[in-house]
Image (spheres, rainbow, N blue to C red):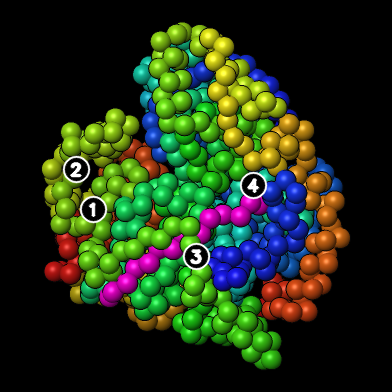
Amino acid sequence: MSKTLYDKLWDAHLVKQRDDGSALIYIDRHIVHEVTSPQAFEGLRLADRKLWRVDSILATPDHNVPTTSKERESGVEGIEDPVSKIQVQTLDDNCDSFGITEFKINDKRQGIVHVIGPESGASLPGMTIVCGDSHTATNGALGALAHGIGTSEVEHVMATQCLVAKKMKNMLVRVDGRLQAGVTPKDVVLAIIAKIGTAGGTGYAIEFGGQVFRDMSMEGRMTVCNMAIEAGARAGMVAVDQTTIDYVKGRPFAPTGEIWDQAVEAWQNLVSDADAVFDTVVEIDGNGIDPQVSWGTSPEMVLPVHGVVPDPKAETDATKKAGIERALEYMGLEAGQAIKDIHLDRVFIGSCTNSRIEDMRAAASVIKGRKKAASVKEAIVVPGSGLVKAQAEAEGLDKIFTDAGIEWREPGCSMCLAMNADKLGAGEHCASTSNRNFEGRQGYGGRTHLVSPEMAAAAAIAGHFVDVREF
Amino acid sequence: MKAFTQHKGLVAPMDRANVDTDMIIPKQFLKSIKRSGFGKNLFDELRYLDEGQPDQSCEGRPLNPDFALNQSRYQGASVLLARENFGCGSSREHAPWALDDYGFRAIIAPSYADIFYNNSFKNGLLPIVLSEAQVEQLFAEMYKNEGYELSIDLEEQLVITPSGEKIAFEIDEFRRHCLLNGFDDIGLTLQDADAIKAYELKRQASAPWLFNAIKAGV
């Protein structure tokens, strides 16, 4: 019987199908960070349980770490927020006592969990990959089954190497055609979420297929898979092709020699069969996608850059109408206002969605030779890992940013969720390359607009949103 | 996990769609390394008029009088009535921890985000799915009748209104079974330890690259 990529990944990891409809699924790779793991370690200790397979785990602190070089200089000791410091220290202590490999705060390989997994080769095609973080779907770009889990499940995987799961449904999101210059993977995924809604993918594993994804780099595919959860799907994935294999080759934890050849042969099969049946198929014309900007407080509240903020009066559904009204009030916007007339107080380029080397290059290409608008209080670029940072510096990208009056920071999650000191003030508008525009997400009362790195860079220069294609 | 069999309790509303887990428990409270104590910060940004800080006492903080959970008629509520896509966004299990710590035992909504739904069961918090029309009916009845209580019977898969109307709900058999018995998930899975080991041996032979060790020196 023909299978989808997801069917194949599921079948290959099925340890046991139980009579009650649940299944035991084997987990190949477990990535751990400081926020969602302490209670899991505590649970193991309380029950006197051991790790099933310690060498399947890779840990790094990312959510709480400061991003200024001053605060980073003295490692964990230098973290000024005492509560954050305890959490980062707790991860170090837990990893040390359980024997888990951790890229500690000042290890050059430290970074955002979803950036370092693929970058180090810890995440490979065909794997099941979990992490106590909803953006784990990023790893699905490798042709893997990757998704976020809660802390109870973190503990469960640590103790058993398995998850109790129920198979999801299959959705294909096909985007054919060719993207216009200036239109990026971020715009593609925002356009997808705008179309299917934040609950559109609930209960599904999404495969992103079609010419646009075939033409896309691995970094771009990661941006798209990263935001599958914003469409409600725990897992997003892209089939393996030569781009995937070229990306993985030579990474520190990737196989070598004969085993590499064996692996590559097996990975060729990580595609949906030509006649595989999906429960739902969504089609979008890639030629018609414009640069996107979110205007509201949900990732489905997205418009093309030349759009105008919607009028709640035009909405007939009472719950949706109330949602639009609340979003307009929170965002301080008026119905009919042009997206291009939204002025920015801050700009954030970073997060697990857009902090890989390509994102740094894309932002730098727009900024080169220009200056940040004086009306923008602060613009920061936060690379996704120490290795991304080093690569960007080797290419001189840091200089392009700092010459423009934009800050170049140390790696971490930073202002995507503002658990560290990088946050928005109340009422401030931010052009952000992150993934969530929820109320308060980037700081109490902060107003987030989700965009691509190119669009964020252009907004930092202009002081308001502009169409990067005309910039 | 904590068992759930039957429950009767006061109903409170969370009358908006797409309530995300950032809203249920804002990130600053995620810095805790404990599993308890999140209840006082449940819906912090909606509930209080100031910005909450971790390790801060909430006594004396200014309350938002418009927020349902601050109104006298909803004090002591243990059943939360909500709208579609409840619990979307971040996978933080702190969301069900906060709801549980506050005193909620069950939620009723037309739909939930997958990870939140899953996390709730791990904490003995029952997320019930009813149709949009049924949820709408319960909202209307609740707003009309102060002290509105619902009875929930997981064994029979029923929500029972004060008038005695019985509304059936669906739930996966394995989730229902685990919750009714308060099973320890890990203990249950470890009963299959032999099957897991057998799987590993087979996989190691056919796909050895999946067992590449994560080592510090690499």
Q: Which mark is residue A277?
A: 3
Q: Which residue is mark 2?
A: A310
Label 4 in the same subunit as label 1 = yes
What element does badge 4 sit on? helix
Q: Which mark is residue A151?
A: 4
Q: State the CA–CA distance, disc 2 to disc 4.
A: 38 Å
Q: State the CA–CA distance, disc 1 to disc 3.
A: 31 Å
Label 3 in the same subunit as label 4 = yes
Which mark is in front, 4 or 1? 1
Q: How many marks?
A: 4
The residue marked by circle 4 belongs to what chain?
Answer: A
Q: Residue A206 or A103: which is nearer the viewer?
A: A206
Is residue A111 visible in this depiction of the protein? no
Q: Is residue A173 magenta?
A: yes
For the residues bearing labels 1 and 2, Cβ distance under 8 angstroms = yes
- Residue at the location (69% across, 36% down)? B176
For the N terminus of chain A, the image quarter is bottom right
Q: Which residues are magenta?
A: A165-178
x and y percent of residue B1 in the render? 73, 36
Q: State the CA–CA distance, disc 4 to disc 1.
A: 35 Å
Q: Which residue is mark 1?
A: A303
Q: State the CA–CA distance, disc 3 to disc 2.
A: 37 Å
- Describe residue A82's horizontal placement relative to residue A16 as left or right: left
Crowding at mark 3 (Cα within 10 Å: few <14, some 14-19, many 20+):
some
Q: Is residue A95 magenta?
A: no
